């Protein structure tokens, strides 16, 4: 009996429903394989990069070691000086002004921190500094001003803020970084940023930021939130690490990245000593806020 006859007999015996079930199982297996391969970050891990050595062993103060009760606000010079003085690295946010000056500020607009309904990208720097942070003494600092605080003292995790796919800001930000001797890595929620660094600055440690966007009830299209939650741009951007919301560490894609691919991981944002202790099981480095962890370097 020929193989074609064997197959024909087999499918006749199992019937239409059985055939459909087999097809569905095969399709599910194929989709599962595609899913797992999409998360693959590439063959070279972060542990192979010499620049990682100076970044490991630190805890990173989220937007600086800020304390609103003491009028030391996030992403300000006093917050970063306080982080360094207390022996911590820092995480910060960088974006461009209208005149292409990299500044350290989290939100795309000034509503929350400056009480002004204007966007950072629409203002020149000399206009931005007219609006003090929380009506206090601090203004939005230039990136280069903050870098000088950390030179030779502590490392930085630099989050690049980008709302679209125009990576022009990466060029300006990286130029400023290259002019200062600060141990650093870059990260972004936007995979275009990670891709730009892979193509143009492969020696820079780069990370993909992510979270369970459905649990967080984040705005955005369903398919985009699904892709980003599940780290499915990794095969293209090949990040050296993944920075994931510590509360979402149970997400399957994160566990595949961590357990199967042995990927390096950064936790954000740890707010208690108990969270810090728990996150040590799933993360290699932690970004903290609202408390001060023990320094264990």
Image: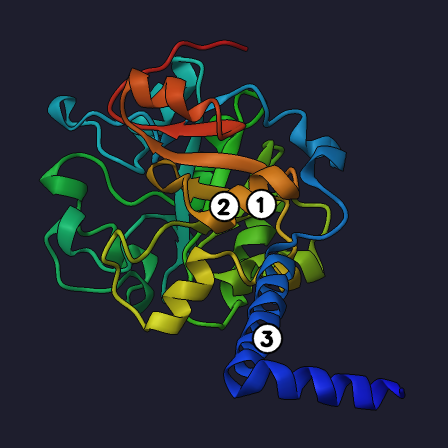
Residue bearing mark 1: 257
Q: Earlier in the sequence, mark 3 or mark 1?
A: 3
Q: Quadrant of residue 77?
A: top left
Residue 169 percent across, percent down from the top left:
50, 62
Residue for point 59% across, 27% down: 55
Locate the N terminus by quadrant.
bottom right
Residue 90 percent across, percent down from the top left:
43, 30
Q: Are marks 3 and 2 in contact (CB under 8 Å)?
A: no
Residue 221 percent across, percent down from the top left:
32, 73
Marking on residue 254 = 2
Q: Is residue 240 above or below residue 16?
A: above
Q: Are marks 1 and 2 in contact (CB under 8 Å)?
A: yes
- Compare residues 218 and 202 and report the one nearer the observer: 218
Residue for point 42% across, 46% down: 251
Q: Earlier in the sequence, mark 3 or mark 2?
A: 3
Are there few (<14), some (14-19), or many (20+) residues within 10 Å of tag 2? many
Q: Nearer the viewer, mark 3 or mark 2?
A: 3
Are there few (<14), some (14-19), or many (20+) residues within 10 Å of tag 3? few
Gap between marks 1 and 2 measured at Cα:
5 Å
Gap between marks 3 and 2 measured at Cα:
29 Å
Would you say residue 49 is visible in this rendering?
A: yes
Marking on residue 22 = 3
Q: Secondary structure at mark 2?
A: helix
Residue for point 26% across, 59% down: 218
Q: Is residue 201 above or below residue 59?
A: below
């Amino acid at each position: 009996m020929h193989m074609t006859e064997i197959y024909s007999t087999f499918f006749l015996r199992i019937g239409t429903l059985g055939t459909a079930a087999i097809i569905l199982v095969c399709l599910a297996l194929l989709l599962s394989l595609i899913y797992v391969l999409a998360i693959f970050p590439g063959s070279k891990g972060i542990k192979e990069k010499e620049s990682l050595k100076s970044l490991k062993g630190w805890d990173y103060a989220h937007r600086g070691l800020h304390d609103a009760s003491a009028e030391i606000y996030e992403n300000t010079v006093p917050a970063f000086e306080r982080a360094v003085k207390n022996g911590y690295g820092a995480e910060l946010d960088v974006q461009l002004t209208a005149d292409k000056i990299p500044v350290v500020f989290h939100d795309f607009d000034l509503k929350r921190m400056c009480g002004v309904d204007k966007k950072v990208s629409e203002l020149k720097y000399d206009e931005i500094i007219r609006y003090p942070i929380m009506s206090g003494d601090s203004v939005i600092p230039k990136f280069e001003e903050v870098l000088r605080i950390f030179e030779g003292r502590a490392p930085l995790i630099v989050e690049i803020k980008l709302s679209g796919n125009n990576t022009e800001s990466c060029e300006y930000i990286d130029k400023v970084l290259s002019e200062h001797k600060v141990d650093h890595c870059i990260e972004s929620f936007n995979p275009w940023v990670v891709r730009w660094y892979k193509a143009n600055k492969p020696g820079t440690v780069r990370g993909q930021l992510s979270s369970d966007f459905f649990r967080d009830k984040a705005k955005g299209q369903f398919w985009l939130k699904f892709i980003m939650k599940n780290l499915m741009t990794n095969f293209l951007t090949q990040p050296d690490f993944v920075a994931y919301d510590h509360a979402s560490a149970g997400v399957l894609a994160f566990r595949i990245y961590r357990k199967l691919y042995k990927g390096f991981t950064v936790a954000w944002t740890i707010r208690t000593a108990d969270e810090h202790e728990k996150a040590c099981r799933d993360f290699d480095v932690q970004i903290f806020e609202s408390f001060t962890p023990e320094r264990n370097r």
